[in-house]
Image (cartoon, rainbow, N blue to C red):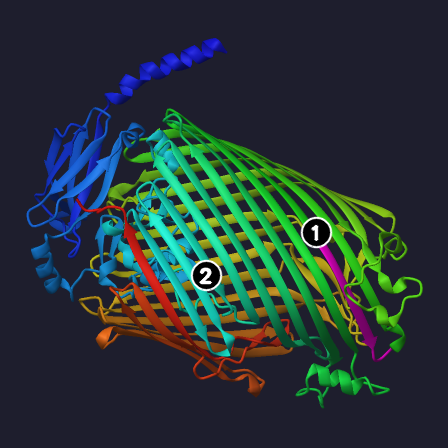
């Protein structure tokens, strides 16, 4: 051991001189912060700690060589910045100084620690500010012509000052206006490409939480937004391309806000006893970031930090009171150390009331189920995370993380429901469930199948511990990765309910149960993964690596679910229906429900081994491609011990599963190494899935008398095939882009439920079965373009369409198991138009519709839903700002005419800032027309579902906010 230690120390000492003597290239580009044009002939100097000039250079504009077939042409690229290059040999602290005629000087400090682990240092894109007199002239000249976006090679740069955002809006509102960007299912896409991560000044301050970055960051402090593809940490460790690129959006702050404390607070009160209190504190510098946020409101929403007074993330149903607080802290003083942490605490109180009408499509008659549900609940949630990353040596990285989650949900509810088969004269159609209960309870005979009353009280608590560890070693051009993750889950559930089921056709089957359950579940999940990345080729034209890996997972857990029937207690009285009444342990032991109590022990062992190959190459005529392949074999050994009614059932399933992935990328434009101009992508994924072990049990689950589940020991594994073809093209000069994709999916042995509805009892008996009837095909095309030379009018269009089918097994007749093919066809066009003529006005208009055609057996229906959204923000005279948006939902084509309705919801606000934008006063109104009804209708192949939920009523609210920006010292020297 001593010899190894001595050898290591000697090796490090010998290696240090070699590291310090290597040549390091420092490079960057320089642009005008207003016009985004490159600043040529700027004097770039690198000074040492004593103020001596070590090396200097003069910035130069890029001359591009365009080759098409056999002809060549040259052009100056004025929007990619003027580049500079500096070569150094000694590793020490440096000061980068840039001076250009007519501009303020620029200073950047470069630490020695930043130079030790790299061969090239990117100083980034540097934006010079004109000198004060010249700046005034420039602003006058370029106010109406500020460049919104430029391409710098493969990097897109957006100029935040060229977009219209108000003082109270967040980064999300800025990104929504940027050409080529769109939000799809909460994700950011730029020119049709998904953004993997969002950075702040080049660092991952938000730990991959893009939503937090979008909604925490005020738009007014943003200078530039850059979108580019960057190498990740594996490439940094080796200094080679390890094929770990990620597509990132990098938000650059204005220099005056780096190292500045930002504080915002808002208080609001309105009609209908509505209130809102919000505070936000943030500080960001080159090393660290701190944020604090608190929110108290009864506006049915978790508000975003910088969207003070705005209506965002609203819960569409119920009456919710929300309280929350969060703290985030990130520090990365150098390449060798990084610490990330965050704590979120929230508490909600809900009052919800809803009714639901469900019409199940059955043969020969449809089944009608109507219910009303009233719930009072509260939830307390805590999420705490911390991670430390260390790089003690150049080619090593270690990380350990811990995540704790606590979720406690208390619910008190009361459900009433009725069921009957559809008949010609439906006298109950326009009656409430309460009225049907009252009328039918007084009749000797009724056409109802049953009525159900189900008050309940429940307390659920879940605790999650997640420990992660990572070790990475770079050996020459190769990498060893070892990951480990340990998860420990605890779930507790105590619940009491009264289940009063009254059958109208056969009253002898009616029953009233008073149930109590006390469940305890524990689960441990261990996951260990090791991989070796071998770089087999590294030339200018070809770069390839192969990665064998081994993974072991073990899942072990215990479920304890005792059920008790309190109505079976001796001398039980009807008046003892108090949901808070819990007998002693001795009494509970006398009324255990053996038919529905169960205890289970699960053990899953999974050993996976696979091979990944990734190859980047250069084809003829300077065109590039990328190939990625993955093949994995996994041995799965699953065991379930299930005890019920003193009967022990053991289910074991051992399988060898094979999965694969293939990705082919081709960049048809010459010299386009990353496919930023044009790209073809073909993906295939083959994924196996084992059925849930409880589905394989040859037992019946009868806890819910209306829904009886029967296990199926004969279930087979599913296997899903998914093929996707994508193409995109970007016209960089005209700022147009087009994206197209097509997707095909098929599942072998897909699992669906075979259902039989009892005509006389209204019961549903269902059993999982295998089919191979699931197919889907879909396609989408997106096109975006500016409509004028100043790019103030921007158009984005898209069309989606698809076809899907699967087998349905729903019937009310006990015949041989037969299925009907359920088919769904849809087409969904969308058009969005944005118009921003100047810095005082911003408008947008969006129209979309979705046409659906659903058929199954003798049923065929087509309908469509149209959404229209319009928004305007106007900076009025005397400092006022008006914001208004209207959203219209229009339903048409339904067979039932009463469903063909239009629901417009109009919100508006008027605000003004005082005291140099520090004080804000805003008055806002929600649902001005009082047309939000809380009614939704969905029709699919199984049935039609009409729902109503209580919701936020029309209100008017006054907000008063205050903002402070405090800096310890001037940031511009």
The span picked out in magenta is 492-506
Name the residue: 72% across, 82% down.
Answer: 434
The image quarter in which residue 447 lies: bottom right
Q: Nearer the viewer, mark 1 or mark 2?
A: 1
**Residue 667: x, y in percent?**
31, 48
Tell me the element at label 1.
strand
The image quarter in which residue 708 lies: bottom right
Task: Say left or right for 795 vs 580.
Answer: left
> Residue under circle 2?
185
Task: Say left or right for 664 vs 61.
Answer: right
Tell me the element at label 2.
loop
| Mark toward the start of the polypeptide (1 vs 2) | 2
How far is the residue under mark 1 from the one under mark 2? Answer: 33 Å
- Verify whether residue 685 appears in magenta: no
Q: Number of labelled discs?
A: 2
| Frontmost residue, 298 versus 764 | 298
**Residue 345: x, y in percent?**
53, 54
**Residue 158: x, y in percent?**
25, 56
Q: Main secondary structure of the magenta part?
A: strand
Please tell me how crowded label 1 is: few (under 14), some (14-19), or many (20+) other residues with Cα within 10 Å: some
Name the residue: 90% across, 66% down.
Answer: 572
Q: Quadrant of the C terminus?
A: top left
Q: Which mark is residue 492?
A: 1
């Amino acid at each position: 051991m001593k010899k190894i230690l001595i050898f290591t120390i000697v090796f490090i000492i010998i290696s240090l001189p070699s590291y310090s003597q290597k040549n390091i290239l420092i490079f960057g580009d320089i642009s005008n912060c207003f016009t985004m044009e490159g600043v040529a002939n700027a004097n770039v100097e690198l000074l040492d700690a004593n103020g001596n000039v070590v090396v200097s250079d003069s910035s130069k504009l890029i001359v591009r060589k365009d080759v098409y077939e056999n002809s060549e042409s040259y052009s100056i690229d004025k929007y990619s910045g003027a580049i500079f290059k500096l070569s150094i040999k000694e590793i020490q602290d440096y000061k980068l100084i840039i001076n250009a005629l007519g501009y303020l000087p620029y200073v950047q400090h470069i630490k020695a620690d930043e130079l030790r682990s790299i061969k090239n240092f990117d100083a980034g894109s540097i934006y010079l500010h004109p000198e004060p007199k010249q700046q005034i002239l420039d602003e006058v000249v370029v106010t109406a012509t500020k460049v919104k976006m430029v391409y710098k090679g493969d990097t897109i740069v957006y100029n935040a000052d060229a977009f219209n955002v108000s003082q109270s809006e967040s980064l999300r509102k800025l990104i929504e206006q940027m050409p080529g960007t769109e939000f799809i299912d909460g994700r950011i896409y730029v020119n049709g490409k998904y953004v993997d991560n969002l950075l702040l000044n080049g660092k991952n301050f938000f730990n991959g939480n893009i939503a937090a970055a979008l909604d925490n960051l005020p738009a007014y402090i943003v200078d530039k937004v850059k979108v580019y593809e960057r190498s990740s940490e594996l490439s940094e460790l080796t200094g080679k391309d390890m094929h770990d690129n990620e597509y990132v959006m990098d938000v650059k702050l204005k220099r005056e806000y780096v190292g500045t404390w930002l504080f915002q607070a808002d208080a609001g009160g309105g009609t209908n006893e509505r209130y809102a209190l919000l505070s936000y504190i943030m500080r960001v510098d080159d090393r660290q970031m701190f944020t604090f946020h608190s929110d108290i409101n009864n506006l049915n929403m978790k508000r975003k930090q910088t969207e003070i007074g705005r209506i965002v993330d609203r819960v569409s149903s119920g009456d919710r009171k929300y309280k929350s607080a969060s703290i985030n802290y990130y520090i990365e003083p150098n390449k060798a150390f990084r610490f990330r942490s965050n704590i979120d605490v929230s508490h909600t109180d809900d009052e919800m009331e809803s009714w639901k009408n469900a019409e199940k499509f059955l043969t020969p008659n449809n089944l009608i189920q109507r219910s009303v549900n009233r719930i009072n609940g509260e939830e307390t949630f805590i999420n705490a995370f911390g991670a430390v990353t260390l790089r003690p040596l150049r080619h090593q990285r270690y990380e350990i993380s811990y995540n704790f989650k606590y979720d406690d949900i208390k619910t008190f509810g009361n459900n009433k429901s009725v069921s009957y088969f559809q008949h010609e004269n439906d006298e109950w159609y326009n009656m409430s469930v309460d009225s049907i209960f009252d009328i039918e309870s007084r009749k000797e005979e009724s056409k109802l199948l049953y009525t159900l009353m189900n008050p309940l009280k429940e307390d659920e608590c879940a605790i999650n511990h997640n420990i992660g560890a990572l070790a990475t070693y770079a050996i020459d051009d190769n990498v060893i990765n070892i990951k480990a993750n340990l998860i420990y889950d605890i779930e507790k559930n105590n619940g009491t309910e009264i289940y009063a089921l009254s059958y109208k056709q056969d009253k002898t089957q009616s029953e009233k149960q008073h149930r109590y359950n006390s469940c305890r579940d524990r689960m441990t999940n261990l996951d260990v993964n090791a991989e070796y990345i071998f770089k087999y080729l590294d030339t200018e034209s070809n770069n390839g690596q192969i990665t064998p890996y081994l993974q072991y997972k073990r899942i072990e857990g215990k479920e304890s679910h005792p059920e008790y029937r309190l109505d079976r207690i001796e001398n039980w009285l009807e008046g003892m229906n108090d949901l808070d009444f819990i007998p002693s342990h001795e009494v509970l032991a006398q009324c255990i429900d053996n038919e529905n109590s169960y205890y289970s022990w699960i053990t899953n062992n999974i050993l996976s081994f696979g091979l990944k190959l990734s190859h980047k190459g250069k084809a003829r005529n300077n065109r590039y491609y990328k190939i990625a392949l993955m093949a994995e074999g996994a041995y799965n050994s699953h065991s379930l011990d299930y005890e019920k009614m003193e009967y022990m059932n053991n289910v074991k399933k051992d399988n060898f599963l094979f999965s694969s992935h293939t990705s082919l990328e081709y960049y048809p434009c010459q010299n386009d190494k990353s496919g930023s101009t044009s790209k073809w992508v073909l993906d295939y994924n083959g994924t196996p899935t084992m059925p849930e072990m409880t589905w394989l049990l040859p037992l019946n689950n009868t806890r819910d008398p209306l829904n009886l589940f029967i296990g199926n020991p004969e279930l087979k594994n599913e296997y899903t095939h998914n093929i996707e073809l994508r193409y995109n093209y970007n016209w960089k000069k005209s700022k147009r882009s087009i994206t197209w994709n097509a997707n095909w999916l098929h599942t072998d042995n897909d699992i669906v439920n075979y259902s039989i509805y009892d005509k006389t009892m209204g019961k549903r008996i269902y059993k999982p079965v295998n089919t191979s009837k699931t197919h889907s095909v879909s396609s989408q095309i997106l096109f975006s373009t500016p409509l004028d030379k100043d790019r103030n009018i921007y158009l984005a269009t898209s069309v989606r369409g698809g076809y899907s089918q699967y087998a349905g097994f729903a019937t009310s007749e006990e015949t041989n198991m037969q299925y009907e093919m359920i088919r769904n066809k849809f087409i969904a066009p969308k058009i969005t138009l944005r118009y921003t003529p100047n810095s005082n006005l911003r408008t947008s208009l969006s129209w979309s519709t979705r046409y659906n055609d659903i058929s199954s057996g003798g049923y065929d229906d087509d309908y469509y839903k149209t959404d229209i959204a319009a928004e305007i923000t106007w900076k009025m005279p005397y400092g006022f700002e008006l914001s208004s948006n209207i959203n219209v939902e229009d339903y048409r084509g339904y067979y039932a005419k009463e469903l063909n309705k239009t629901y417009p919801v109009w919100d508006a606000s008027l605000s003004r800032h005082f005291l140099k934008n520090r004080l804000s006063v805003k008055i806002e109104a929600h649902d001005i027309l009082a047309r939000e009804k809380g009614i939704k209708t969905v029709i699919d192949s199984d049935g039609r579902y009409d729902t109503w939920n209580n919701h936020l009523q029309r209100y008017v609210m006054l907000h008063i906010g205050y903002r402070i920006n405090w800096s310890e010292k001037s940031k511009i020297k």
